[in-house]
């Protein structure tokens, strides 16, 4: 394994609301190794997207990155000035979003939107940029690129738009691509194509941080997975280990809820209870109120990350 | 990939921007929506808007050709036929000084159309830029710009216009400036509220993510998306500018007699309303027709231009 493209250390991001500080991301540390796909999985509101936006430096007011380090290739990018961040975004780190239907500007031609990043970051003549754009569009699987470039977003299908988004994000060959639920809004066949494309990009040398709530997507393409719950990482392991031997009760619950679809049961497996309000987190383990194997100690203190069997497999649970 | 092949694709792409879309692609993604095809659609679907456009065009032609097509001179007085009703010699009658109303109407349309269009463009430019900046940057920039706008709006607009006119002195250029300074605030408010909505969209976020600087997002991504609103606002503000100019002229601060503007004519005919109603009625109807024409055209344009109202 090579070095890490992205290292996040003890990241804390909060939203300073009128009702108090909402700690959306708490002490998150994670690594995205070079040339690998790293996944973050968790249910809505667990802090996946906020983690991603913290990396991009795009947490919106009243959100604020409170502490921690965000190391891109060993360089802390958390507190660099906005101008330098702008130069990094798109050229070194890029991101794609969940909603391809609304992520492209409706009044600008596709070609223009894709070449914009290139013209911003690279000092190349317009003609060169156009050529790169065509190549990029073709490499993300858009045939007939010359004609597609003159289209406006509403003239393309969801899958094509997501490809355009990826082309936009990838055209400067960033080291890191953050994909925030890139396939959630797409239908299953298109999803498979997009995932294949992301794998291809990854083998082309880009490290990918994939955020998803879909365990199937994670299982298909991720090398290493972090599970998040209520702002914290509760388990991390390589994909095979995580799916074979989950250590945290929350991960087990997620897997049960997912796999039960294939079994012949009438009732859909669920995790009882609801996600705790981030304003009033329980005193001990955040998952304790919903946990089947919860003991007294779990209600009193927050567990640390403990080794759980194999190397690199950690879980935030006293049980392991 | 062969660079030559890509180069060829680019060349074709650039050429294709200049000519209509080829049939093959058209069948796949539907008709390209250029300004021309949108206008064609409006012509097809909205006859009222087309009619309005024709009316406005006729008014413009009449204004340009006023000296050629007027039957009399602007201040030519026919003292024997003062206050004569509409008829053969004077199509729309004469006023209290025996001047031909049709002639004055034609000359007046020059002033009225200009004061409708020029200050509106100025106020739209000012309002759109300030509004989009205010909405996007927020915080203190927003606070400062919006408080100035609030003060402008809170002032009775006529009073404000009078004060500005008084300071600048009369004359057509000063009327333009005054109207622009009075009307920018409402444009800024509307554009700001639209910007607040647009800046939360994902494509703005997507643009931020690829490193587009804020300044470029404001002017290249947000402002073009406000365009449909601006076009509609334009057609709504033109009539109000025409009306404000009328009032200013009446108060002696705008266009000075013996020059003519429609507002001036309406107001000077006021005292003869009972025995010679055509003095006010004719320019009044002209104002009404042009105002309605602009409104209908605005509606028609909005129907075809607004990307969020597509059927």
Image: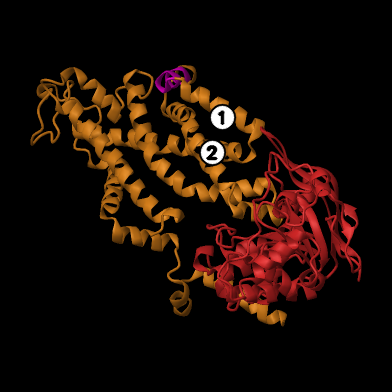
Chain colours: A red, B orange
Quadrant into which the C terminus of chain A falls: bottom right
Compute the Cα span from label 2 to label 1: 9 Å
Question: Residue B282 shows which numbered tag?
Answer: none
Residue B223 located left or right of residue B217: left
Q: Earlier in the sequence, mark 2 or mark 1?
A: 1
Is the C-beta separation of discs 2 and 1 under 8 Å?
Answer: yes
- Asked whether residue B298 is drawn in magenta, I would say no
Q: Answer whether residue B125 is visible to the viewer in this image.
A: no
Point out residue A247 in the picture as x, y percentages from the top left corner. 81, 63
- When asked about the image quadrant of residue A162, the answer is bottom right
Look at 62% across and 65% down and name the residue there.
A269
- When asked about the image quadrant of residue B253, the answer is top left
Question: Residue B146 shows which numbered tag?
Answer: 1
Chain of the residue on which disc 2 is drawn? B
Decide whether the magenta segment is chiefly helix, strand or loop. helix
Q: How many marks?
A: 2
Chain of the residue on which disc 1 is drawn? B
Q: Which residue is mark 2?
A: B192
Q: Which residues are magenta?
A: B156-165
Please tell me which residue lies in front, B303 or B166: B303
Residue B221 located left or right of residue A56: left
- Asked whether residue B157 is drawn in magenta, I would say yes
Point out residue A104 in the picture as x, y percentages from the top left corner. 58, 59
């Amino acid at each position: 394994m090579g070095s890490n493209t992205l290292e996040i250390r003890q990241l804390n991001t909060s939203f300073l609301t009128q009702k108090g500080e909402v700690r959306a991301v708490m002490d998150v540390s994670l690594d995205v190794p070079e040339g690998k796909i790293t996944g973050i999985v968790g249910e809505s509101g667990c802090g996946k997207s906020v983690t991603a936006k913290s990396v991009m430096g795009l947490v919106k007011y009243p959100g604020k990155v409170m502490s921690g380090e965000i190391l891109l290739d060993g360089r802390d990018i958390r507190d660099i000035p906005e101008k330098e961040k702008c130069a990094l975004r798109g050229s070194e780190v890029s991101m794609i979003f969940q909603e391809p239907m609304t992520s492209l500007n409706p009044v600008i031609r596709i070609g223009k939107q894709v070449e914009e990043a290139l013209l911003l970051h690279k000092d190349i003549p317009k003609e060169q940029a156009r050529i790169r754009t065509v190549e990029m569009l073709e490499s993300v699987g858009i045939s007939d690129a010359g004609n597609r470039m003159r289209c406006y977003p509403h003239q393309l299908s969801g899958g094509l738009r997501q490809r355009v988004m990826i082309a936009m994000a990838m055209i400067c060959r960033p080291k890191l691509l953050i994909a925030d639920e890139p396939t959630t809004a797409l239908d299953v066949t298109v999803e498979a194509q997009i995932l294949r494309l992301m794998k291809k990009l990854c083998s082309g040398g880009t490290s990918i941080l994939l955020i998803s709530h879909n365990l199937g997507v994670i299982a298909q393409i991720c090398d290493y997975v972090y599970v998040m719950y209520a702002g914290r990482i509760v388990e991390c392991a390589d994909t095979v280990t995580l799916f074979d031997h989950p250590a945290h009760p929350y991960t087990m619950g997620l897997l049960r809820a997912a796999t039960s679809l294939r079994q012949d049961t009438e009732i859909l497996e669920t995790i009882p209870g609801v996600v705790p309000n981030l304003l009033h987190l329980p005193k001990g383990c955040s998952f304790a109120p919903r946990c089947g194997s919860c003991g007294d100690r779990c209600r009193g203190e927050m567990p640390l990350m403990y080794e759980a069997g194999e190397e690199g497999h950690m879980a935030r649970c006293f049980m392991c | 990939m062969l660079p030559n092949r890509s180069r060829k694709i680019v060349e074709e792409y650039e050429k294709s921007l200049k000519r209509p879309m080829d049939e093959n692609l058209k069948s796949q993604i539907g008709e390209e929506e250029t300004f021309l095809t949108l206008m064609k659609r409006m012509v097809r679907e909205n006859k009222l808007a087309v009619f309005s456009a024709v009316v406005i065009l006729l008014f413009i032609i009449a204004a340009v050709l006023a000296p050629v097509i007027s039957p009399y001179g602007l201040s030519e007085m026919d003292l024997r036929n003062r206050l004569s009703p509409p008829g053969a010699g004077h199509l729309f009658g004469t006023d209290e000084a025996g001047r031909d109303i049709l002639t004055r109407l034609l000359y007046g349309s020059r002033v009225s159309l200009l004061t409708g269009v020029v200050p509106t463009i100025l106020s739209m430019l000012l309002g759109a830029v300030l509004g989009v900046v205010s909405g996007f940057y927020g915080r203190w920039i927003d606070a400062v710009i919006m408080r100035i706008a609030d003060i402008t709006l809170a002032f009775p607009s006529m009073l404000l216009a009078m004060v500005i006119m008084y300071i600048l002195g009369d004359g057509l250029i000063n009327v333009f400036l005054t109207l622009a300074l009075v009307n920018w605030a409402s444009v800024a408010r509307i554009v700001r509220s639209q910007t607040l909505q647009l800046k939360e969209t994902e494509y703005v976020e997507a643009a931020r993510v690829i490193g587009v600087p804020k300044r470029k997002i404001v002017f290249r991504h947000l402002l073009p998306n406000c365009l449909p609103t601006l076009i509609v606002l334009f057609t709504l503000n033109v009539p109000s500018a025409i009306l404000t100019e009328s009032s200013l002229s009446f108060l002696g601060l705008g266009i000075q007699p013996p020059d003519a503007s429609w507002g001036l004519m309406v107001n000077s005919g006021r005292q003869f309303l009972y025995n010679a109603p055509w003095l006010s009625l004719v320019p009044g109807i002209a104002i009404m027709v042009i105002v309605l024409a602009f409104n209908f055209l605005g509606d028609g344009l909005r129907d075809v231009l607004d990307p969020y109202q597509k059927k």
